[in-house]
Amino acid sequence: MSARSVAQEFFDHMEAGEVEHIIGMTAPGAVVSLVPLGVRGSMAEEGASYLRDLARAFPDLLVRVRRLFVTTDNTAVAEITADGTQAADFLGVTNQEKHFDLDQGWLLEVTPEDMIGGVTAYWDQNQLYRRLGVKRLDKITITAR
Amino acid sequence: MTTDATSAGSSTMSRADTAQAAVTAFFGAYQAQDVERMVDLCADNADFRYVPFEVRTRQRVLHGDGKVRTVGKAIWTALIDAFPDLSNTMINVRSDDEGNVAAQVSIGGTQAKAFGVIACTGGHYDLPHLFVFHVGSDGLIDDIAAYWDNADWNKQLGWLEID
């Protein structure tokens, strides 16, 4: 196993909505930072909660890894594209069955034991809102048809 | 290419260190608001992709996607013009032995002019960014991609419309 294959497996499970598998890949005390959501916490709680919401809202989710490399400190750096069709409310956005595609950057810190010790993710929430039909940042639940 | 740009890659440094030095020099030039120097640290045909940069016009969507010397230079110049105290803080830089670099950087500034659709209210922003670079064996950056959250940026500047 390598950090590269750990990362690929992480995104395969994300696509499949297999959150328990992902949590099984994390080291005890693994942390997560979902930068656009202002979420910082543990992978077991905040990370798992986000991934479950994602899987429920986008059951046809596709995750394509566009670029992946591992830095000298064993961090896997991934540029991915996620796309899917909304099937349930997500992050306060009412479901309008809209399709989204969103490019994202993820950092997965991998331990010498090939466990994930830290996850940091970047994307543009404005792009996500736009694709899901949200018109104003202060009225996320009000969407355009 | 400049002599200084090439000197980022000393033969005694590993490829990872060389790449990291090039990226550090790039953000040093950005901090100094020296756009010409930023461009000089990049290869002539360096690719550029600011992922969240989307400008919607009546007919089409313009993306921040192209070359450093055209799209990149124009965006950096416009940013510094609109935010004259634009500055950056490098939080973390990681690299590998093939010239790939990931940099977590905080960028902020105070608005002095309209920027895109965002009218100037004199607001200040600080925003976390992820930059992903590739640095060639000559020590020059040949690819830049960046990720940030425009929702956070727009809210800090008082712009709540999602166009």
Image (spheres, grey):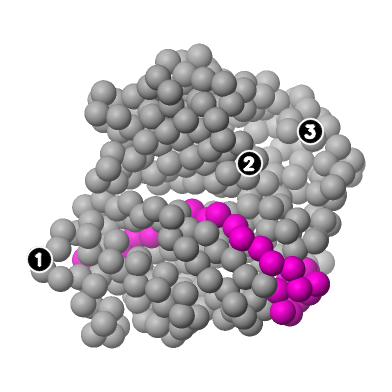
Of all chains, the one bearing label 3 is A
Q: Residue A38 carries which label?
A: 2
For disc 1, the neighbor class at 10 Å (few under 14, some 14 to 19, many from 20) is few
Q: Are marks 1 and 3 on the same chain?
A: no
The Cα–Cα distance between marks 1 and 2, rounded to whole angstroms, is: 41 Å
| Nearer to us: label 1 or label 2 | 2
Q: What residue type is labelled 1?
A: Thr
* Marks 1 and 2 in Cβ contact (< 8 Å): no
SS state under label 2 = loop
Q: Residue B12 carries which label?
A: 1
Residue A46 shows up from this direction: yes
Q: Residue B134 carries which label?
A: none
B162 horizontally vs B115: left or right: right
Q: How many labels does the image show?
A: 3
Which corner quadrant holds the N terminus of chain B? bottom left
Q: Where is residue A52 in the image (x, y as percent from the top left)?
A: 62, 21
Q: What residue type is labelled 3?
A: Gly
For disc 2, the neighbor class at 10 Å (few under 14, some 14 to 19, many from 20) is few
Q: Which of marks 2 and 3 is nearer the N terminus?
A: 2
SS state under label 1 = loop
Q: Please tell me which residue lies in front, B59 or B51.
A: B51
B138 horizontally vs B31: left or right: left
For disc 3, the neighbor class at 10 Å (few under 14, some 14 to 19, many from 20) is few
Q: Where is residue B67 in the image (x, y as percent from the top left)?
A: 47, 72
Taking the magenta stretch, the answer to whether it contains residue B52 is no
Of all chains, the one bearing label 1 is B
Query: Range of the magenta residues?
Result: B111-137
Residue appearing at x 80%, y 61% in the figure: B158
> What residue does disc 3 label?
A92
Which corner quadrant holds the C terminus of chain B? bottom right
The Cα–Cα distance between marks 1 and 3, rounded to whole angstroms, is: 53 Å
Of all chains, the one bearing label 2 is A
